[in-house]
Amino acid sequence: MLQVEYRFLTGITSGIIILMGLYLLLLYRSTSGVKGIGYWAIGSLIVGVGQLFRLFPSLGSFSVIVVPTIFSTIGLYLYLAGIWQFKGKVIRHWIIFGLPLVNLVQSIVFYQFIPSNRIRGILLGIILLINCVLAIYEMFQVASDQKYLKQLFRINGVAFFIFAMLLVLSIVAVSVNPGFDPTKIDDFVLIRLVIAGILMIALTFGFMSAVNIQLKRQLEEQLASRNKFFRIIAHDLRGSLGTMTKFLNLLNNEPDLVEQELKSNLTELEQLSGSTYHLLQNLLEWSSNYDSLSKLKEEMIEIDHLVKDHIEHFKSLAKFKSIHVEYEKSAKALIKGHRKMLETVLRNVLSNALKFTPENGTISIKTESKSEKVYLRIKDSGVGIPPEKLDEIFKFEASRSSLGTNGEVGSGFGLVVCRDFVQKNNGSIRIDSQLNSGTEVILEFPAVP
């Protein structure tokens, strides 16, 4: 009767673990953003298939006694590799492959050449216990960017702890029993099988849940990034199109313009439309290659070239308000970062300077490199920022658009995005401002030698 119950429980447990492994394998083949799935999928399949050998005694005692333990050890250490990879840590291959190899060798030696089920069982328990200790440590060490998985990891950590206690009891039971026989089925073996099966299912389910939570979070981040991206497009085009509209209104409402003034305004309008078209092309190129803002590739960027590529466009916008734009470049200021992000930051800061600088004002742009840092300073002679607003200017929940000196409107989120993008490029942004005395935005990045 006990044999029937043992085979039934083994079949149910291994079947569930195999199904979970197949589900994880399906996730692995259909997703690319979550690490560790491959190890968990293969580990689950190996553990499940290994347990099936216990159902076929006709294959021989080695297949029934030794093979399942070898498979389980390999699968559990693949679980550990998956945990390391999921958390973004270096996989210690000498542990992942070394300890299962030690178990394989000792299993063969103490089964085939120096028969001793007692020694083999104790060594197996120690090797699995090492796996549990390492897994427990990792489950309770959660990085700041994975705090949302803290509760789930703790549950898995508790499961590993219970499994470790079960191993300790098994090691003690084998140690005090000189005539230990792994083929003997009794109540303790059935209880241990039930507990171990439940724990293995719980661990596999925990890994599945971690993957699903991570995928859900990535989807939310991608949707948030896409919304942010559409706002960036609207923000960058609003200023240019608004200025072009004012040019056209001027031409339409001033029929007495002399030919020279008319030609000058049309030239300015042509330059502005050309630079706006170029801006739109860049944004569309970015969107066509867009997947996630965090996946943009880093490159070497000459900060002066970055400014030079955009300054003519803003000079055209500045002429409408008779604002003088000055540019003082450094000898060499090289940084490493995401060009599209930094272009967005530059456009936002320059747009704000134009927006809040009155007619006949001045905007000065300066790049410099010193003390292993690269600085981009944008200073205007505008209306300045009230102290109470300056303290909350980078808070998303407090971001509200203010009208410019000529009634220009904005989205209210520009500087929030700027800070986010600057930080993603290992930089910092600081604003010095006094009411009615202008504003200076200082961008700081690590210099590249």
Image: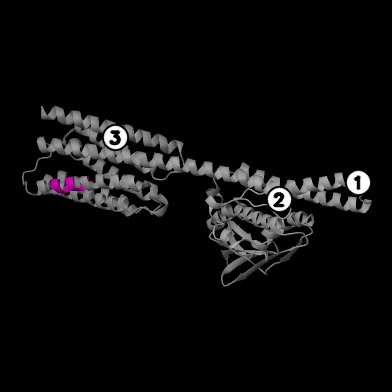
Q: Is residue 138 left or right of residue 166?
A: right
Q: Please rate how many residues cluster around mark 3, counting C-alpha atoms within 10 Å: few if below 14, some from 14 to 19, many from 20.
A: many
Find out whether the residues at labels 1 and 2 contact each other: C-beta distance under 8 Å: no
Query: Residue 166: percent from the left, percent from the top?
Result: 17, 45
Q: Nearer the viewer, residue 103 or 215?
A: 215
Residue 255 numbered tag: 1
Instruction: Measure how far apart labels 3 and 1 are at the Cα level.
Output: 82 Å
Give the SS element for disc 2.
loop
Numbered disc 1: secondary structure? loop
The chief SS type of the magenta part is helix
- Which image quarter is the C terminus in? bottom right
| Residue appearing at x 65%, y 62% in the figure | 384
Which range is magenta?
163-170
Circle 2 residue: 408
Pinpoint residue 309: horizontal percent, then vertical percent.
71, 56
N-terminal of the two: label 1 or label 2?
A: 1
Q: Is residue 67 above or below residue 106?
A: above
Furthest residue to the bottom? 371
Q: Residue at x 45, y 36 (%)?
A: 30
Say which of 321 and 181 sits in front. 321
Q: Residues within 10 Å of mark 1 (few under 14, many from 20)?
A: few
Query: Could you tell which of marks 3 and 1 lies nearer the N-terminus?
Result: 3
166 drawn magenta: yes
- Classed neighbour count for the residue bearing mark 2: other residues with Cα under 10 Å, few (<14), some (14–19), many (≥20): some
Disc number for residue 17: 3
Q: Quadrant of residue 184?
A: top left
